[in-house]
Amino acid sequence: MKKVITYGTFDLFHEGHRQILLKAKGLGDYLIVGITSDYFDIQRGKMNVKQSLLERIEGVKKCGIADEIIIEEHAGQKVADVQKHCVDIFAIGDDWHGKFDYLNEYCNVVYLNRTPKISSTSLREDQFGIVRLGVVGTGRIATRQAHELKFVSGVCNYAVYNPNKSSADKFASKHGISLVFDNYDEFLEKVDAVYIASPHDTHYDYALRSLNAYKHVLCEKPMTLSGNEAEHLFSVAEQNKLVLMEAIRTAYAPGFINLLAIARDGRIGKIKDIEAAITKLIPQTPHSREYDVNVGGSFTELASGSLLPIIKILGKEHKSLNFDFFTNNENVDLYAKAYLKYDDAIATAKTGIGIKSEGQLLISGTKGYILVNSPWWLTKAFEVCYEDTTENEHFSAPFPGYGMRYELADFIRNIREPELVNFKLTRTDSIALAYMMENFIQIRKERLGALAC
Ligand code: CTP
């Protein structure tokens, strides 16, 4: 008996899927279909798959062509499957041409013609439409967003805004965006949602105007530099039934969510201390926003990230919050430490733009600790360590790119399915972070004022 194997996501089972299964079956006597698990799809960066694994299995089953269905759970599984199931032929659509030649060592690899003009992506777009996203600001982060958005279906960068039109023009032509604006109201008229990646002190105004114009908002961190402003934005979003999300990419990345689950499951006992550090040496140039005396500094630049694991694990009800910092001659903090005290735990968040330190996350408990090495904010792997080192565990959850595609996919999902609960970075999380920003800025001002006297 000749055995054939093929793989796919098989989301919203369509004619292209039926045809490829028929062709694959025609190559032998017995067809095995490998269907990707939900987690594997997320991990490999295939975002916005609409159906659950069970629904996708049901779709393949119903067509009656497969003799056996297996689940593909991780990269590198195909070799093991081919050997385990004594497969003769590996068949796949020619959109993968050449990618699986390495399997020729184990079986015969055949690339089959793909059925034209149909795909799960186009079905998803027909069914749910495309969210027209407007990009506010055209700097480094917006460039990353434009790269990552290509991996998220159901959304496109439709227009770009920058008060400096020539910057917007450059960005638009580089990323194939046809609409360019230097007038915010005209820009808002053309889009369904906005992604705000402008300087920190402009976030509030842009976000508020967008929400008042009934546009969903994904806003780069820190969303605001004051707690009241964050509260106000969320109340307008709620009133107008809109999605408002803060873009802290770590919060949405699969590895970080896995890390939180492991930290909370009790294996390291009671968590007593968290140390989180992010430092990034940023050269000071005359116009660098990171060194702006009013809104720049290491804390506003990086603390949304280093405070995130602390508030996600120990909560937002700290008993005290204190700071130490070094500034440059213009009173911009180059390095800052936030000390948080809880009823039964302590934590430190460290940030630096002019002083470099080891960027690690260390979560200490009564039975062991979790260590995530730099860059922990793109959590791809971590160690759980115990007194008996032979019991140490290693977890890994690799993901492609900068990790932004996960927050973008969640943003689109929340727009489409507002009934879904967003637990990854909640309204209260963002508000708490904004109050901490405000607190730091206030203390920095007071302390420097006192030193000047
Ligand atoms: N396939 C095909 N013809 C199509 C669509 C898919 O032959 N029009 C094949 C793919 O080449 C692959 C299998 O069907 O061998 C499963 O592909 P999958 O990725 O699930 O389907 P797509 O519709 O391409 O999904 P997406 O748009 O999400 O990438």
Image (cartoon, rainbow, N blue to C red):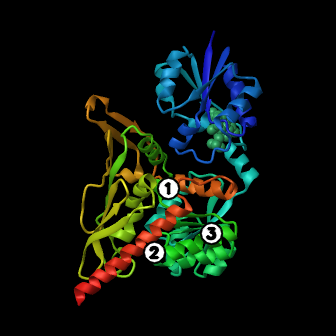
Label 3 vs label 2, nearer the camera: 2
Quadrant for the N terminus in the image: top right
Residue under numbered circle 3: 178
Q: Regarding ligand 1, which quadrant of the image does it lie in?
A: top right
Q: Nearer the viewer, residue 350 or 247?
A: 350
Q: Which residue is rendered at x = 69% and y = 21% of the image?
A: 25
**What residue is at 57 percent from the left and 16 percent from the top?**
88
Query: Left or right: 61 with respect to 401?
Result: right
Quarter-of-image position of residue 259:
top left
Mark 2 Cα shell of 10 Å, populated few (<14), some (14-19), many (≥20): many
Element marked by disc 2: loop
Indicate yes or no: mark 1 CB to ligand 1 under 8 Å.
no
Quadrant where the C terminus sits is bottom left
Residue found at x 31% / y 40%: 368
Q: Could you say which disc has been placed on residue 225 in the image? A: 2
Query: What residue did someone put label 1 on?
Result: 404
In the displayed structure, would residue 297 be above or below residue 304? Answer: below
